[in-house]
Image (spheres, rainbow, N blue to C red):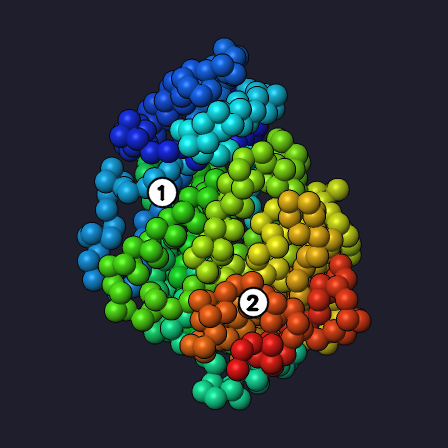
């Protein structure tokens, strides 16, 4: 069997009692062995047996099983014991299994076998496959460029996005009954007002890894930067914490593989939990309200994408493409939830050192879900409306993803008004500014996600953006600079 070669892929597999039993084994190494054996049996049965070679069947190990690592702890659950069922009683229809292959060739063969199986039996046991990549927060700092460390303050940044229009609207748009899920490095619950705290997902993978609970991140975490900025624009919004990306302080960071497979598990878990609460608590206006998913993370380096373009350009052969992209599209199209991404920090000038040599600059720095046409993708400008050189530039990959990305830009690199030590930087901050404006807009009942679906909200943001460099789209600013007043003018009266 292979060593850890980093030819890594995950699959979504239809749940059966046997699969649940293997998945739920308390001893992780044993569970991984059982899951490997389960997959080997699948490959030697219909509809895959005619395409699976002995080399493939014996050429992989299971190295991850993230679907049941996440436990919901939302504030206000009336029947917590029912909502947080133990893993063995999970109602998951599909489970994510992560594989490591002896070679990239075997990984590609696995993808081909699954694709052939889907043509014979579209509802086969293996629903989809996708290459697994590590995701990193889109924070940014520039040692040696202190003159660019901070352009302005939060107040100036709010003026840049015309936030005054939110307060001037009657009644004021403050994010009331709007739910904002921050999929990031974790939040510090004690630093968030109780009325704004909604709980979140705990990461509990079992020994030897150390659990990471929602709300237990440091006060200065990347996620808290996001939370402060969102609440500055939508002060009544309720925040939910999903600590997908580990802080450096977490000792078990190696075990906490924050990859696309974990993001897949998180999105599936959130989808189920929100649907469950809306059904079990139909009278709770908070659960029935709008939901916004905020993702200040990106792919900075494609060097570890074993099947190049499978996720980053959505060249995946599965129906719907890469499973994570398909899941996000479903969340937007079927659930009607807004999803916001940071463009990334791999622009032509002052790119993050984490960016791959060929993964920076125009046409080479916005990848995967960040370039999905349905999501809102935010790049960064200063409060003086000048493009910041580290902000990732379009066009996006096109074809199976969008070419005209980013959609717009929002301010970054500013200090908090009352805490000069709190720097807000990177396209993460631009993403948070955008999320704050969207959360505020969504608090108008006439602009709920049924009457104004995500596509119409995105169109209002694009059409209302300030066109400082001409009426058309360009690779730096997208369609212009975020303007709350302009968006209001493009939404139904």
Query: Can you say whether 232 is above or below 218 in the image?
Result: below
| 113 to 445, vertically: above or below | above
User: Of residues 354 and 323, which is closer to you in this image?
Assistant: 323
Packing grade of label 1 (10 A; few <14, some 14-19, many >=20) is some
Which residue occupies the foreground of this view, 360 or 40?
Answer: 40
Look at 31% across and 71% down and name the residue there: 285
Q: Residue at x 52, y 16 (%)?
A: 51
Residue 324 shown left or right of residue 427 in the figure: left
Q: Which residue is mark 1?
A: 69
- Establish if 265 lies above or below 349: above
Look at the image and tell me whether residue 238 can be seen: no
Residue 407 appears at what percent x and percent y? 66, 62
Q: What residue does disc 2 label?
A: 456
* Cα separation between marks 2 and 1: 35 Å
Element under disc 2: helix
Q: Position of residue 362 (x, y in %)?
A: 77, 52
- As drawn, is 185 to the left or to the right of 363? left
């Amino acid at each position: 069997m292979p060593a850890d070669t980093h030819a890594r892929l995950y699959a979504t597999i239809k749940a059966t009692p046997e699969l649940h039993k293997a998945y739920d084994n308390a001893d992780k190494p044993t569970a991984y062995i059982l899951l490997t054996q389960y997959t080997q049996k699948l490959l030697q049965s219909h509809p895959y047996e005619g395409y699976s070679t002995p080399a493939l069947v014996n050429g992989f190990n299971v190295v991850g099983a993230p679907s049941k690592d996440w436990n919901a702890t939302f504030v206000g659950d009336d029947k917590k014991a029912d909502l947080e069922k133990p893993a063995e009683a999970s109602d998951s229809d599909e489970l994510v299994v992560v594989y490591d292959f002896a070679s990239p060739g075997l990984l590609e063969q696995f993808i081909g076998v699954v694709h052939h199986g889907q043509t014979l039996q579209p509802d086969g046991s293996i629903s989809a496959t996708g290459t697994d990549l590590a995701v990193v927060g889109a924070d940014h700092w520039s040692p040696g460029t202190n003159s660019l460390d901070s352009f302005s303050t939060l107040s100036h940044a709010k003026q840049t996005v015309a936030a005054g229009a939110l307060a001037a609207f009657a009644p004021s748009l403050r994010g009331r009954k709007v739910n904002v899920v921050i999929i990031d490095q974790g939040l510090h619950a004690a630093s968030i007002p109780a009325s704004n705290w909604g709980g979140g997902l705990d990461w509990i993978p079992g020994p030897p890894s150390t659990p990471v609970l929602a709300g237990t991140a440091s006060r200065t975490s990347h996620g808290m930067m996001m939370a402060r900025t969102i609440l500055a624009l939508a002060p009544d919004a309720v925040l939910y914490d999903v600590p997908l990306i580990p802080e450096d302080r977490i000792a078990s960071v190696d075990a906490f593989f924050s990859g696309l497979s974990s993001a897949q598990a998180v999105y599936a878990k959130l989808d189920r939990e929100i649907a469950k609460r809306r059904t079990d608590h139909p009278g709770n206006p908070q659960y029935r309200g709008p939901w916004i998913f905020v993702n200040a993370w990106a792919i900075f380096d494609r060097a570890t994408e074993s099947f190049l373009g499978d996720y980053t350009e959505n060249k995946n052969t599965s129906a719907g493409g890469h499973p994570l992209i398909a899941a996000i599209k479903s969340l937007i199209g079927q659930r009607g939830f807004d999803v916001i991404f940071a463009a990334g920090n791999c622009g032509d000038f002052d790119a993050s050192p984490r960016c791959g040599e060929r993964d920076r600059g125009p046409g080479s720095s916005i990848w995967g879900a960040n370039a999905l046409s349905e999501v809102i993708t935010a790049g960064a400008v200063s409060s003086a409306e000048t493009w910041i050189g580290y902000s990732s530039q379009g066009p996006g990959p096109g074809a199976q993803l969008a070419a005209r990305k980013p959609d717009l830009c929002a301010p970054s690199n500013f200090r908090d008004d009352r805490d000069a030590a709190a720097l807000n930087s990177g396209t993460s901050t631009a993403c948070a500014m955008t999320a704050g404006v969207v959360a505020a807009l969504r608090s108008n009942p006439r602009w709920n996600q049924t009457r104004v679906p995500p596509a119409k909200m995105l169109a209002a943001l694009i059409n209302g953006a300030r066109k400082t460099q001409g009426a058309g789209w360009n690779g730096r600013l997208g369609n212009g600079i975020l303007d709350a007043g302009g968006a209001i003018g493009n939404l139904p009266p």
